[in-house]
Image: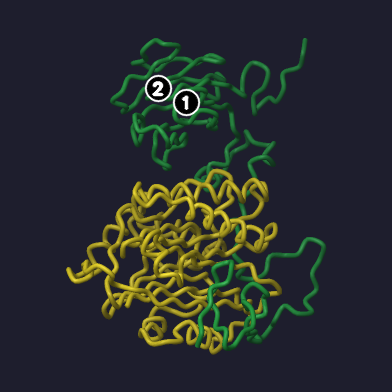
């Protein structure tokens, strides 16, 4: 046996194969009953039985224009709620990145478990540094300090209590300076769509 | 997810600790095997790779990487997704700084791969992954989706990752509600559907090792897609993983013996510590 590693990192026996059998797709083929050869495939082929699939409820975020309707608990878990705004980091370790704000209580922290995960800033608490809440009824956003040890600033002022956010407010989490950019505002909400010009 | 954390912790307690002689410099070396087949499918949507597999100097200096990705059928091109992921992981591994936090970089590489797939397939397609990096006989790993990652140590076979699928979600709900009916969870019509995958909009869970696992001579790692793990059960695997040559070939034989009419693509990688 002479084992060779091909350019794509596959191992094969050069005594048996002249070139990598996995790259060419000509590895040994075992015939299984009910092989898909000759199977009729429509224009939109149905998922094959047992194929690795996304859940039935999975839809792309971009496609969900009819939101505002009740969202199943399962989809909630998947956080496919519509985006209602963004934070954009304009200064600090994650400069240039944006974070989506969804229509609920958004947790902020370094951990990937957080809704708004600011990984690159060690001065931000791992979990629950703060919360960003979207209030559907009043179409309003609030910044709620949570378990951070470092003070959170809003427009250079320290924040100790839940504080209403306005468009282009500057929030400081640790060393990150972020601009708050609402998507849902007086001109648009997911419930009512675009407000008609009077 | 708290339950996964607890599960991981339990694993740590159960797996026998590496003995002191594993710290001998220059030990262990590895022996690697791989196998891949399309099964009864029209296309091969699994992808896999090793890096620094055969160059001893390279893996001593920079570590060794292996990954299995199972592209999702039933959505956009599964092969594109799994290939994109593999290529992304290869680039990330080349840029790996072994003096810094390897586990953290591995986690970041998972999110990077996911973002790349999302860019290409726009959230309408994806891939699972099991990726491992072995550096100085320490194993770091991460997984997303329903592929399998096993450690065979001593006489035991240990599953190192949890699956991100509806079946597991039902387990969790069952436990929370005080009962635990495994069969009921498995019978869920959506049981096999993934709850997390690379390329998904809003990937939020990565199953991974926070601290590395020290490998010891005789350890066997098996990373495989569900075309292997979902067909050949643990008892059979334990029998096959005996440390002799041709284990991957015997896994393939066993898959052929099962002769599932809808046999999924199958891919298996074995890392044997000598």
Q: Is residue B270 visible?
A: yes
Q: Chain of mark 1?
A: A
Residue A144 - label: 2
Q: Position of residue A144 (x, y in %)?
A: 40, 22
Residue toward you, A142 or A92: A92
In yellow, which chain?
A: B
Left/right of residue A71 with respect to residue A150 in the rendered view:
right
Using the rendered view, name the quadrant where residue A124 is placed.
top left
As drawn, A190 above or below A115 = above
Q: Earlier in the sequence, mark 1 or mark 2?
A: 1
Q: Are marks 1 and 2 on the same chain?
A: yes
Residue toward you, B221 or B105: B105
- Residue at 65% x, 71% y: name it: B44
Residue toward you, A1 or B107: A1
How would you rate the neighbour count of disc 1 (Cα within 10 Å): few for under 14, some for 14-19, many for 20 or more? many
Left/right of residue A51 with respect to residue B207 in the rendered view:
right
Left/right of residue B109 with respect to residue B59 in the rendered view:
right
Q: Which residue is mark 1?
A: A133
Is label 2 in a helix, a strand or a loop?
strand
Q: Position of residue A43 (x, y in %)?
A: 82, 62
Q: Position of residue A197 (x, y in %)?
A: 77, 13
Left/right of residue A14 with respect to residue B210 in the rendered view:
right
Colour for chain A in the figure: green
Residue B105 - label: none
**Label 1–label 2 contact, CB within 8 A:** yes
């Amino acid at each position: 046996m002479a084992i060779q590693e091909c350019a794509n990192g596959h191992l094969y026996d050069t005594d048996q194969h002249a070139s990598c059998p996995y790259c060419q797709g000509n590895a040994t083929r075992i015939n299984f009953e009910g092989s898909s050869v000759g199977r009729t495939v429509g224009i939109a082929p149905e998922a094959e039985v047992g194929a690795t699939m996304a859940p039935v409820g999975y839809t792309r975020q971009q496609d969900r224009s009819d939101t505002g309707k009740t969202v199943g608990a399962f989809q909630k878990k998947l956080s496919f709620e519509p985006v209602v705004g963004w934070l954009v980091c304009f200064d600090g370790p994650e400069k240039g990145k944006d974070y989506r704000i969804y229509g609920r209580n958004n947790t902020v922290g370094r951990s990937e478990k957080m809704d708004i995960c600011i990984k690159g800033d060690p001065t931000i608490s791992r979990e629950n540094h703060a919360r960003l809440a979207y209030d559907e009824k009043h179409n309003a956003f609030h910044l709620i300090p949570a378990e951070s040890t470092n003070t959170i600033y809003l427009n250079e002022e320290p924040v100790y209590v839940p504080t209403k956010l306005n468009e282009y407010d500057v929030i400081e989490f640790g060393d990150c300076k972020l601009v708050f950019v609402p998507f849902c505002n007086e001109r648009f909400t997911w419930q009512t769509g675009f407000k008609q010009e009077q | 997810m708290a339950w996964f954390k607890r599960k991981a912790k339990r694993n740590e307690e159960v797996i026998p600790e590496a003995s002191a002689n594993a710290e001998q410099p220059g030990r262990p070396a590895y022996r690697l095997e791989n196998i891949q087949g399309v099964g009864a499918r029209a296309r091969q949507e699994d992808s896999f790779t090793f890096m620094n597999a055969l160059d001893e100097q390279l893996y001593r200096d920079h570590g060794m990487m292996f990954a299995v990705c199972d592209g999702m059928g039933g959505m956009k091109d599964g092969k594109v997704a799994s290939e994109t992921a593999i290529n992304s992981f290869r680039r990330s591994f080349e840029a790996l700084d072994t003096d810094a936090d390897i586990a953290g970089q591995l986690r970041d590489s998972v999110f990077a791969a996911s973002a790349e797939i999302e860019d290409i397939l726009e959230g309408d397609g994806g891939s699972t992954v099991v990726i491992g990096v072995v550096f100085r006989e320490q194993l770091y790993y991460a997984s997303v989706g329903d592929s399998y990652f096993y450690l065979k140590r001593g006489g035991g076979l240990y599953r190192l990752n949890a699956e991100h699928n509806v079946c597991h979600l039902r387990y969790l709900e069952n436990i929370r509600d005080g009962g635990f009916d495994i069969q009921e969870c498995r019978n869920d019509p959506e049981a096999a559907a993934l709850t997390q995958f690379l390329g998904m909009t809003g990937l939020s869970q990565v199953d991974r090792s926070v601290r590395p696992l020290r490998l010891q001579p005789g350890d066997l790692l098996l990373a495989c897609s569900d075309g292997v793990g979902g067909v050949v059960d643990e008892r059979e695997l334990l029998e096959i993983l005996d440390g002799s040559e041709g284990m991957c070939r015997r896994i393939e034989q066993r898959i052929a013996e099962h002769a599932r009419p809808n046999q999924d693509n199958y891919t298996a990688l074995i890392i044997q510590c000598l």
